[in-house]
Amino acid sequence: MEIGSSPIFPVLFVNLNHQCCSVQVCNRLYEANKNVSMSIKESSTNNENKKTMESCCSEIYAVNLISGRWILSICYQLKQERLRFVELKNRIPNISERMLTLQLKKMEQENLVIKTVYAEVPPRVEYELSEIGKKLLPVLSQLEVWGKEHKASKKKE
């Protein structure tokens, strides 16, 4: 019996029209000695699977880069102008200062945002989208259009 041919060995296939994006995730492994063992620790394989998928598939890399609750909101706020931390905080309802700080650091590390620190008293820090971040704006516009269409179609059902 092969893995995936029985409900005992469920297999999940993810295919994004790329051969390199096909992933098989087994809940249990069928070993050569026919003993069933539990999967390897999720903490180790999960991270490795993510890295492998991101290295093969640009789509997965991009989605993982902008995933999260606040990244798109921050990009949207920065699309027209530079903003200070407090201005961003005031424009994005319900985000905590800690979360905004973490998200801005992540975006800066990924070269989506440029942080400019001015040598003034009191210190002034401004954030703006980088050139790479600005290239994301047309994609965000298309996501907005798709989201509106999908939301409207769900309401009709």
Image: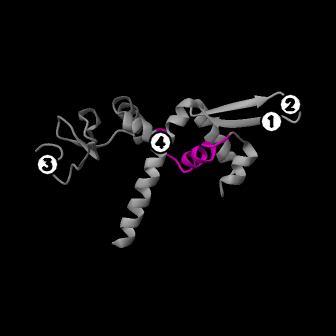
Q: Which residue is mark 2?
A: 120
Which secondary structure lies at badge 3?
Answer: loop
Amino acid on which disc 4 is placed:
Pro
Q: Which residues are magenta?
A: 65-81
Q: Is residue 155 left or right of residue 83?
A: left
Q: Residue furthest right?
A: 121
Number of other residues with Cα within 10 Å of mark 4, as a class: few under 14, some 14 to 19, many 20 or more: few
Which marked residue is nearer to the observer: mark 1 or mark 4? Answer: 4
Question: Which quarter of the rendering shows the N terminus?
Answer: top left
Q: Residue 85's quadrant in the figure?
A: top right
Q: Is there a contact, CB below 8 Å, between mark 2 and mark 1? A: yes
Residue found at x 23% / y 50%? 10
Q: CA distance from mark 1 to mark 4?
A: 30 Å
Q: Which residue is mark 4?
A: 138
Q: Nearer the viewer, residue 79 or 43?
A: 79
Q: CA distance from mark 4 to mark 3?
A: 43 Å
Which secondary structure lies at badge 1?
Answer: strand
Q: CA distance from mark 2 to mark 3?
A: 67 Å
Amino acid on which disc 1 is placed:
Arg
Q: Which residue is mark 3?
A: 5
Determine if the magenta segment contains residue 156: no
Residue 131: x and y in percent read 56, 30
Amino acid on which disc 2 is placed:
Glu
Q: Which residue is mark 1?
A: 124
Which of disc 4 and disc 1 is earlier in sequence? Answer: 1
Which secondary structure lies at badge 4?
Answer: helix
Which of disc 3 and disc 1 is earlier in sequence? Answer: 3
